[in-house]
Image: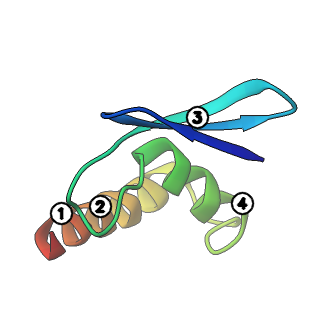
Amino acid sequence: MQLKHDDNNLYLCHNGSLVRTHVLSKKRFNYQREDMREIVESDLYHDRDDEIIDAFVDKNMQQFDELG
């Protein structure tokens, strides 16, 4: 993985291909919802249905926003 940045964005690249872009901010946590959902779905809640996974992700994203 290679990390690149400019004044507003962080770029994550693998073998020269852009994998993900994150907007730089003052927030402590900078997760994108789809990334968190993929992580939760593949491990922690792999046997749960979509509604339960989405509720868990939404709750955690809200808590991250409240932390700043």
CA gap, disc 2 and disc 4? 17 Å
Q: Report the front residue among 60 and 2.
A: 2
Mark 2 to mark 1: distance in Å?
6 Å
Give, as a three-letter code, the residue at label 2. Answer: Met
Q: Which mark is residue 42?
A: 4
Q: Position of residue 8 (x, y in %)?
A: 31, 34
Q: Nearer the viewer, residue 1 or 64?
A: 1
Residue 46's mark? none
For the residue carrying disc 2, how many other residues have a C-alpha within 10 Å: few (<14), some (14-19), or many (20+)? some
Dot 1 or dot 3: first in sequence order is: 3
Mark 2 vs mark 3, CA separation in Å: 18 Å
Q: Secondary structure at mark 3?
A: strand
Upstream in sequence: badge 3 or badge 4: 3
Q: Label 3: which residue? A: 20
Say which residue label 2 marks: 61
Left-right relation of 2 to 23: right
Q: Distance of mark 1 from mark 3, alpha carbons?
A: 20 Å
Say whether disc 2 or disc 4 marks the residue closer to the N-terminus: 4
Query: How has the structure been colored for display?
Result: rainbow
Secondary structure beneath disc 1?
Answer: helix
Give the mark nearer the N terminus: 4 vs 1: 4
Dot 1 alpha-carbon crowd within 10 angstroms: few under 14, some 14 to 19, many 20 or more: few
Q: Amino acid at mark 3?
A: Arg
Quarter occupied by residue 57:
bottom left
Q: Which callout, 2 or 3, points at the residue further toward the start of the chain?
A: 3
User: Which residue type does callout 1 highlight?
Assistant: Asp
Observer-side mark, 4 or 1, equals: 1
Direction from residue 48 to residue 8 in the image, left or right: left
Residue at mark 4 to residue at mark 1: CA–CA distance: 23 Å
Taking depth in this image into account, of 3 and 35 the one nearest to the observer is 3
Q: Which residue is mark 1?
A: 65
